[in-house]
Amino acid sequence: MRNYLTPNFNFAPMIPDHALGSRVWDVNGQEFIDLAGGIAVNSLGHCHPLLIAALTKQAQKLWHISNIYTTEPAQALAQRLVENTFADQVFFCNSGAEANEAAFKLARKYARDHFGTESKKNEIIACVNGFHGRTLFTVSVGGQPKYSQDFAPLPEGIQHIAFNDVAAIEAAVTDKTCAVVIEPIQGESGVLPATGEFLQAARKICDFHQALLIFDEVQTGMGRTGSLFAYSQYGVIPDILSCAKALGCGIPIGAMLTNSRVGSSFTPGSHGSTFGGNPLACAVGCTAFDIINTPETLNHVVCQGEKLKTELCRIGAQTGVFTEVRGLGLLLGCVLADKYKGQAARLMQLSLQHGLLVLVAGSNVLRFAPSLLIDDDDLNQAMQRLQIAIQSFISE
Ligand SMILES: Cc1ncc(COP(=O)(O)O)c(C=O)c1O
């Protein structure tokens, strides 16, 4: 197939055509088991009947009307997010990067509103290897120079510290800091969970210097780790939380959640988005939320996450390909043994050849983010395919 798109993506050789639950078929009719979930987006699998019904119903009523008006679906989704989290207010946008962009802008404006421009309280502290999106501000806050260096000059006032380094965060945050941003699990760079001590230290030092704590839960949010948001598993409450990916389960939508003290700095006209809070996306988001935020689904995530982890550990021990399986719930990463360092992408290619969709997280970690509803049958067959892929990987 001829590619008419800009060459910034390295497309896989197979072209997906249709999908159902945890199965995907390509244009030639070959079937795949999906343990990638559209990079932690398709959290209710593909073509969930209740999501199709919600989308179809809303499609027949109102698609788009602009943010000159509010709509029932937008208020209904915001209400769900507020009533089930620390937040009092929600800003809707279309992606994780936009949710983070809103968070960073809000943090700077909040500091300016409360401490004045003279205070120069505008620094953002972020983590090495963090990932927050691809806008200029978010690649700059992200801690991977490979994503920002070609686009200089970059926004200023951003400092990076080592992830999970309590002493580093205590030293870095000062009265000039307006916000600290952390992913509870660093997803893109290796499925690396934050320690409880690190997040607690972040909360404490932010409070001391009146800086805001932002959790980027774009990847960990909406049930992925076994709770609605990972922050509740850590018992550390942020001032701002960004969310996207599984919020619409495949319909693009992002959200920035905050408390009313901070949110009040988003005065009329200070920020905006044409499509943010679009009724189609919010209607699907409401139905997705109601399915995800139930004890049945969240318990299922914990249970299937344990099964997947056990299987991956077993395969790792048997083959010597993985040294560690880490993550929470159904966001898991297998760290490749030294002998196979740098070859995660090759293992992903071989998995694809054997009918299995998986992800990488950096070059040394194979990542799994399947549907939160995945059943035993799909999991077991997926593990069989992975084992075959690993055999061909080892024998190369
Ligand atoms: C933690 C985190 N933040 C932000 C983003 C960016 O989200 P989006 O690609 O929707 O802009 C991602 C995407 O992978 C992510 O994992």
Image (cartoon, rainbow, N blue to C red):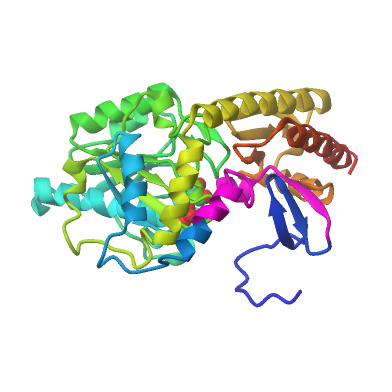
In the image, residue 41 lies in the stretch drawn in magenta = yes
In the image, residue 355 lies in the stretch drawn in magenta = no
Q: Is residue 62 visible?
A: yes
Q: In terms of depth relative to the viewer, which is nearer, 357 or 21? A: 21
Image position, residue 94 (x, y; %): 42, 59
Relative to 150, 26 lies left or right: right
Give the vertical position of 302 relative to 178 (above or below): above
Image position, residue 153 (x, y; %): 37, 65
Q: Residue at x 48, y 64 (%)?
A: 59
Residue stretch in magenta:
29-54
Relative to 109, 12 lies left or right: right
Q: Residue at x 52, y 32 (%)?
A: 225
Extreme residue in the right direction: 395
Q: Residue at x 49, y 59 (%)?
A: 57
Q: In terms of depth relative to the viewer, which is nearer, 260 or 110? A: 260
Give the vertical position of 90 relative to 310 (above or below): below
Relative to 32, 256 lies left or right: left
Q: Which quadrant holds the N terminus?
A: bottom right
Image position, residue 52 (x, y; %): 57, 55
Q: In terms of depth relative to the viewer, which is nearer, 171 or 293? A: 293
Relative to 301, 116 lies left or right: left
